[in-house]
Amino acid sequence: MNEQRKPTIVVDDIHVQYKTFASGKAASDRRSLMQRQRGVRIVKAIKGVSFAAYEGESIGVIGHNGSGKSTLMRAIAGLQQPVKGAVYSASRPALLGVNAALINDLTGEKNVMLGGLALGMTPDEVASRREGIIEFSGIREFIDMPMKAYSSGMAARLRFSIAISRDHQILLVDEALAVGDKDFRAKSEQRIRELRQQAGTVFLVSHSMRSIMDTCTRVLWIDHGELKMDGDPKEVVRAYKKSK
Amino acid sequence: MTEIDYAALAREAGLPRVGARQDLPAYLKEMWQRRHFAIRLARYRIEGSLNQNRLGLAWVVLNPLLQAAVYGLIFGVIMPKSSREGINFIPFLVTGFFIFSFFSKSFSQGARAITGNTSLVRSLSFPRMLLPLAAVLRNIYELVPMMAVLSVILIGFGEYPTWTWLLVPVILAFMTMFNMGVALIAARLTVHVRDVTEIIPVITRLIFYTTGIFYSLEQVLADKPAWMLTLARLNPVHDFVELVRWAFMGGDTDMTQLAVIALIASVVTLIVGVFFFWTAEERYGRE
């Protein structure tokens, strides 16, 4: 059905694992120190997910906590290499997470600079977009204060504003819309729609079925690291709600 | 839906694989384009760590100065004078300590560059090499005021500027290459084996005493077998410290051997470090 359209992202049967330390019952495979590290357990976060995304699509990703949504986003962004399978993409996808790191001891203004540079802009580009970023975040009066003085909502708004200041061909938004008040949420949804119209592809991870239904044209339901359903938002959300 | 060959679909659309490691020239080129990120990160880190203190940036110099004072007080009294005959002790000690701390801080901060920035590594894509390099860069920034204070101390203790002072930046440039190489190797090792962080202070301590900060290795080892001094001189940190001391305070020792070892060590360490770090580029976000 999508033959005439050009895929922007192809995810081919990816498996992602974490190595982590466990104790107690979880560390059942205890081995000696010389053999390897003790109590290391492999967590299989993604177990074989495949799909193709096309230009202009806005894809919602839903699933219970710990189902592997954020891991999938990181794998698509190339920040976490899959142990098996591969992700192919037309341009480097940009991941916008709520916990994107900025330095808390510094003022919002300096964090705008640092965040912009981290996204690959030049200092001049950041300087020219600075006003727009601060305007969008709506926290101009606090911009000269260190970020640790911000409320979590304010910090998240600033991070979101930095991340969307650049035109990304492929944008991955991880639960960022859940933060901020009603006005800010409306503004960000508007911006995401704009981004989509610039022939980009947007992924949106959210627990808010309303923002998924409002912004997305297609929904992926991830359950226990597997792709359970892929299709029209209404159908998938209905099935997802029923499963609870 | 039937089985779709996704790999073929990607091939047809001409999509490259995400997160694939670039070849070294392209990698270094991207790093150069993103250099402003590392520079700002280094500068902001200094500001962020100090703006809570009342004396602020003054601590960059005060801290090593006070530490040098402690060593001077303890060992200047305890150690026999024969361990540093004919040496202007205070400038000798402060020069040694400042140069050594440039190495030790680059080493320890470089080692933590990836593991200490996990959230940054997991949320943004940029050449990971920028993080250990930013750690070294931060120490270069801190070195500048330290050198200014050092020249004041030198002049205050009767070591007046000579033409050889101009060689100090050159020596430090090579030392920076060496430190970068060490930081890159330490950064990758820490990612694989977290235990490395526990050993680094021990290694640093070992290098500290074999470098000769508050005594002259050349004099202490004078009546020992010759191979011991040769061995000590193979430690590049000792060579850098001795070279800077020589440039600042003069002396009649032949520096050729030390200069050659230091030069080779910096070039080799940097090349090995860059290559060693780059080969694991894809793995940094995973653990």
Image (spheres, rainbow, N blue to C red):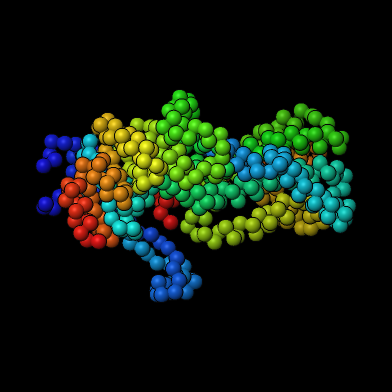
Query: Total of numbered circles in the picture?
Result: 0
Q: Is residue A235 left or right of residue B131?
A: left
Of A58 and B22, the residue lying toward us: A58
Q: Position of residue A190 (x, y in %)?
A: 31, 34
Residue placed at 20% from the left, 59% from the top?
A242
Residue B279 located left or right of residue B235: left
Q: Which residue appears at 38% of the width and 35% of the height?
A: A164
Tell me where residue B287 appears, x and y as whole percent: 43, 56
Please state the horizontal and vertical placement of residue B60, each as a whole percent of the image. 69, 41
Q: Quadrant of residue B163?
A: top right
Instruction: Please name whichever residue, A90 or B51, is drawn nearer the observer in this view of the structure.
Output: B51
Name the outermost residue toward the front: A182
Residue visible at 65% across and 59% down?
A: B202
Which residue is more in the foreground, B94 or A17?
A: A17
Query: Residue B20 in the image: x percent, y percent?
Result: 35, 45
Is residue A194 positioned above or below B117 on the image?
Answer: above
User: In the rendered view, does B182 fall on the left or right side of A176?
Assistant: right
Q: Residue at x 45, y 71 (%)?
A: A23
Q: Is residue B187 visible?
A: no
